[in-house]
Image (tube, grey):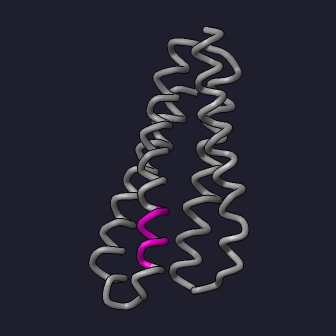
Amino acid sequence: MARVFFILGSLSGLIAVTAGAFGAHTLRDRTSAALLATFETGVRYQMYHALALLAVAWATTRWANSLTTVAGWLFVAGTLVFSGSLYALSLTGARWLGAITPLGGIALIGGWLCLALAAWRG
C-alpha cells in the first residue's frame, strides 16, 4: 500500500500544480474573483492532501495497520469530492455543487483522525 499511496500522492501533487497554473494563467481573466478564490481553495486543499498521502505512504511502512490504509483512502476520496466539487463549481458556476463539498471535507477530517489513531496504536 505504501507504493500505491506514494504514487497517488505524487499524481495528486502534479494535478494540483497544473490546476494552480491553469487558475493563475487562464481563469484569472475569465471568471469572477469569487469563483477564482473557490478554485484556488480546491488547489490548496488538493496539495495539502497530496502531501498527506505521502505521509500515509511513509506511515504504512512504520505502523502497518488498517487505520493507515483507511486514512489513505479517505484522503483520496475526500480530495476527489472536496477539490473536485470546487473545481467543477468554479468552471461551471453550478452553485449546487457546493452542497457536496462538505462531504469531501468530512472524509479529509476522517483521514486525519485515522492517521493519528494509527500512530497512537502503532
State the predominant SS element of the stretch in magenta: helix
- What percent of the width, then of the height, locates residue 3? 49, 30
- What percent of the width, then of the height, locates residue 23? 36, 74
In the foreground, 35 or 63: 35
In the foreground, 118 or 14: 118
Residue segment shown in magenta: 36-42
Q: Residue at x 65, y 81 (%)?
A: 95
Q: Residue furthest front?
A: 34
Instruction: Indicate the quadrant containing the N terminus: top left, top right, bottom left or bottom right.
Output: top right
In the foreground, 35 or 27: 35
Vertical side of 51 occupied by 77: above or below = below
- What percent of the width, then of the height, locates residue 25? 27, 78
Q: Place residue 88 in its image quadrant.
A: bottom right
- What percent of the width, then of the height, locates residue 121? 65, 10
Is 6 displayed left or right of 18 in the figure?
A: right
Q: Place residue 104 in its image quadrant.
A: bottom right
